[in-house]
Amino acid sequence: MIKIYNRKTKTYEEEQVAGLNYLKWCYESPIGKSITELFIKRKLFSKVYGYYCDSPLSKGKVNEFIEEFNIDTNLSIKKQAEFTSFNDFFYRKLTDEARPIDMDKNALVSPGDGRLSVFENIDLNNIVQVKGLTYSLKELISDDKVANEYEGGTCILLRLCPTDYHRFHFIDYGTCSETKKIDGKYYSVNPIALEKVPKLFCQNKREWSLFKSENFGDILHIEVGATCVGTIIQSYTPNKKVEKGAEKGYFKFGGSTTILFLKKGVAKVHQDIVHQTSLGYETKITMGETIGVKL
């Protein structure tokens, strides 16, 4: 059972996990772990399943998924009957009213929907993955010079599960560099997997870029793929100025992760989120929601 913190109700909720039994089998049973290592973590598995989710054959899954996980399709620009495949539904665009963005220049906002963990005053070589497991930023992006700029800074980790809105956005005005891509595996990013696979983020496929923001300095954006996420789409134009809240990209089917690194002394994340992270709980967040302030 995965519990997440709802900051609006100030209560803990049990997360609805898509494919829970499958995840437990893959990462907790001896046979499942062997098959995950031999096949499921590899690109071919996610690529084949990605082709299926892009095809009209997968359209039948849409209504079933919406009903099982109580997805509010009234927030989507497309109507339920208009989706042409499961991925067409999965990375659906929402109406502007669905995700209001705090446009105050001093407001630090979430880049997307998901479950948020925040780590302050980070040690570059020991960034927390889950309790007892850490990873290195230098290893994550394979660039020591860039990584060194974030010593003592803030790590904002947003985990998207399959039921979430799967587009991610810029949190400020500014310009973003071209994306650097690093090949890797396709482990799940669900906590069940994070607790079993050391340095999971450093093993999975990932992409990173530097966003020169107007109010929060140089922000390191990292997108991490996962099982069945055969594609990370970067929809922004490199080195072209964007507005706060503009779309950066989106994930195709699967749970995924967006990680932001801010330099030391740039911003302060709200204490309720930091406190819940220290207790081992992720906080439920929506895109554009205020999560902190500029210092």
Image (spheres, rainbow, N blue to C red):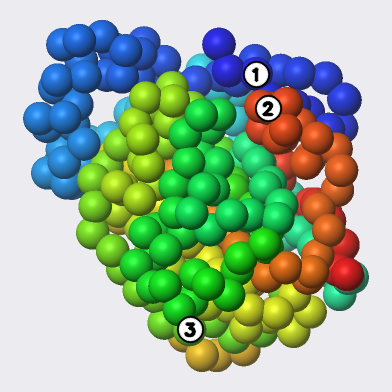
Is 274 placed above or below 21 here?
below
| Element marked by disc 3 | loop
Q: Residue tagged by mark 3?
A: 177
Residue beneath the point at 73% across and 26% down: 279
Identity, as a three-letter code, of the amino acid under mark 2: Tyr
Q: Mark on residue 139? A: none
Nearest the viewer among 69 and 292 is: 292
| Element marked by disc 1 | strand
Quadrant the C terminus occupies? bottom right
| Element marked by disc 2 | loop
State the separation of the CA atoms marked 2 and 1: 7 Å
Is 246 placed above or below 62 here?
below
Q: Earlier in the sequence, mark 1 or mark 3?
A: 1
- Residue 43 position, x and y percent, is 17, 46
Relative to residue 5, is residue 197 drawn left or right?
left
**Callout 2–callout 1 Cβ contact below 8 Å:** yes
Relative to residue 250, is residue 273 drawn left or right?
right
Q: Quadrant of residue 267?
A: bottom right
Of badges 2 and 1, the one in the foreground is 2
**Callout 2–callout 3 Cβ contact below 8 Å:** no
